[in-house]
Image (cartoon, rainbow, N blue to C red):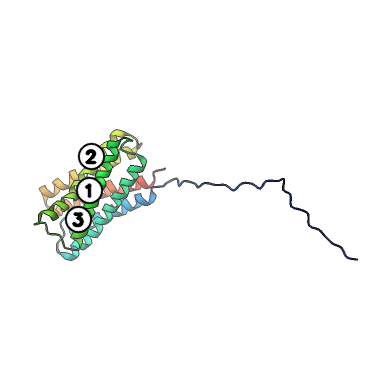
Amino acid sequence: MTIEQTPAAARTDVRRPAAVSGTTRPTRPFRKRGMLLTAGALSWALAMVVMGSDPHGATEEAVFSLASGLFQIGVMGLLTVLWQTQALGEGRVARFFLRLEGVLLSLAICSTFVDGISVSDLDQTGWLLLDLTWPLSMMGMFFIGIRIAIAGRWRGVSRFWPLVAESWAVVSVPAYGIFGGTVAGFVGAAHLCIGYAVLGQIVARKEG
């Protein structure tokens, strides 16, 4: 005797559960950029301690430029965080100054690169103007730090620590003129560790 089994027909009146769509936003979306800022600040601080704020020779210049360039890239990442979070405010003026700072910082990175490969000549006007974008970009960050504190869009310690970090230029540049390169190197390094390295950790822990 042969027994035949016919499989039950699939039911068409039951809906399958819909697939869950959408992506989960990371709770700390700025972690990588914050860690990059910290790494850049510490690398430049170490270079200052070892070589001072005014390196000599092609090798020292290359190493110093590599360290300071990493810091500059970290600051560029910080600018993108400020833009995304509208830390300076929502207005057109705030966006304009962030764009302007981005241009100055980009030129400063170019200046660091040409210094590192020893092709710049500060006796020529063009190279000198390019070199000036480095301190100008740091002064720009100081005014950005003031604006962040005034705007109050970042809360708690993150509201005021950018001003601490971004006062680097107004502290370190006068130290160079008053005490010379060796002392200024230690002052600048200490300020980087206290200011930007800590700010990087604040940004890394900032929730989106």
Mark 1 to mark 2 CA distance (whole Å): 14 Å
Query: Mark 2 packing: few (<14 Cα in 10 Å), some, or many (20+)?
Result: some
The kind of residue on which mark 1 rests is Leu
Does residue 165 appear anywhere in the picture? no
Is label 3 or label 2 in front?
Answer: 3
Instruction: Say few, some or many: other residues with alpha carbon within 10 Å of mark 1 (under 14 / 14 to 19 / 20 or more).
Output: many
Instruction: Using a 10 Å C-alpha cutoff, classify the residue at mark 3 as few (fewer than 14 neighbours), some (14 to 19) or many (20 or more).
Output: many
What type is the residue that disc 2 sits on?
A: Phe
| Quadrant of image for the C terminus | top left
Q: Which residue is mark 3?
A: 111
Query: Residue at horizontal 35%, vertical 48%?
Result: 201
Q: Is residue 103 visible?
A: yes
Labels 3 and 1: the sequence-earlier one = 1
Residue position for label 1: 104
Q: Which residue is mark 2?
A: 143
The Cα atoms of the two marked residues, 3 and 1, are separated by: 10 Å
